[in-house]
Amino acid sequence: MAYVSASVWHITWSELALRMIVAAILGGLVGIEREWSNHAAGFRTHILVCLGSATIMLLSIYGFSEFVYETQVRVDPARLAAQVVSGIGFLGAGAIMRNGNVIKGLTTAASVWVVGAIGLCVGAGFLVGAFVCTFLVLISLYLLNKWEKHLLRHRRLHEVEMVILDEPGALGKIASLFGEQGIQIANLRMNHADGPADEGNGTMHLSFRLRIQKQEKLVCALERIAALDALISLESQDLVTWKYGNEKSNALTL
């Protein structure tokens, strides 16, 4: 679906505005899914990336139309577009975070990059490609994400970070609570802190990698762990967070 103008180097104001509006809508559709999932780059970021890419594409094609017929000037409509493709990576890099062995934000970084491509398609008038790409991106981010989690639910390891008072039996109680729920500890890293905690005891940082069958059992185990007096803080991968000082009844935030 392309727009036909009097000249390939000229575009009407209405066509220009329509392409920019379409770019904002398509970028927003992808951004809503990322915003709904609480990712770093959300609704407005995706709109701006897609709209900016479309604007640069429009500038590259039509912004230099006055120089087309100059004998000493060569016009390359893809020149600015190529810089968008290579330069959009700095935004994606800002969405990628590493926490130990866990790397988050790769999918969001990829969505920012592909939204840039959608914007370029809209700016160039390649609207069929833009709509098809947006449709497939939404399928990948929403439907395939659910299917992937269901398919790999027994193979994926869940990360849980804790800080506890370094006192006898504390680690054993935590391991027992996991075991009661049928949760297997695949890996455990411990770091001792020499500094005093709030009551003069040392602290210990625990990093668990757990193999779970059902997420409900993990939530149940973490609720019971949060009730332990030895626990100072607890953080679970996209699931719960608890910090010392909150009431035990309100310890876990789902």
Image (spheres, rainbow, N blue to C red):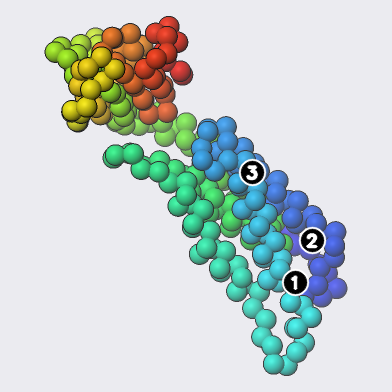
Q: Nearer the viewer, mark 1 or mark 3?
A: 3
Q: Position of residue 66 (x, y in %)?
A: 79, 80
Label 3's element?
helix
Q: Taking the image as drawn, is residue 108 in sight?
A: yes
Q: Residues within 10 Å of mark 3 (few under 14, many from 20)?
A: some
Left or right: 177, with 103 as reference point = left
At horizontal 73% and vertical 51% (from top left) the residue drawn is: 22
Element type at marker 1? helix
Q: Secondary structure at mark 2?
A: helix
Residues at marks 2 and 3, CA–CA distance in whole angstroms: 21 Å
Q: Is residue 221 visible?
A: no
Earlier sequence position, callout 2 versus callout 3: 2
**Residue 180 placed where, x, y %?**
24, 9
In-image side of 142 versus 155 (left or right):
right
**232 relative position to 60: left or right:** left
Quarter where residue 5 is shown: bottom right
Mark 2 nearby-residue class (10 Å; few <14, some 14–19, many ≥20): some
Contact, mark 2 vs mark 3 (Cβ under 8 Å): no
Q: Disc 3 marks which amino acid? A: Arg
Residue pushed farthest left? 168
**What is the distance, in whole Å, between disc 1 and disc 3 at their CAs?**
26 Å
Mark nearer the N terminus (2 vs 1): 2
Q: To which residue does mark 1 refer?
A: 62
- Say if 248 sits above or below 195 in the image: above
Q: Residue at x 85, y 73 (%)?
A: 6
Q: Nearer the viewer, mark 2 or mark 3?
A: 3
Q: Position of residue 139 (x, y in %)?
A: 55, 40
Query: Which residue was labeled with disc 2?
Result: 16
89 in relation to 106, above or below: below
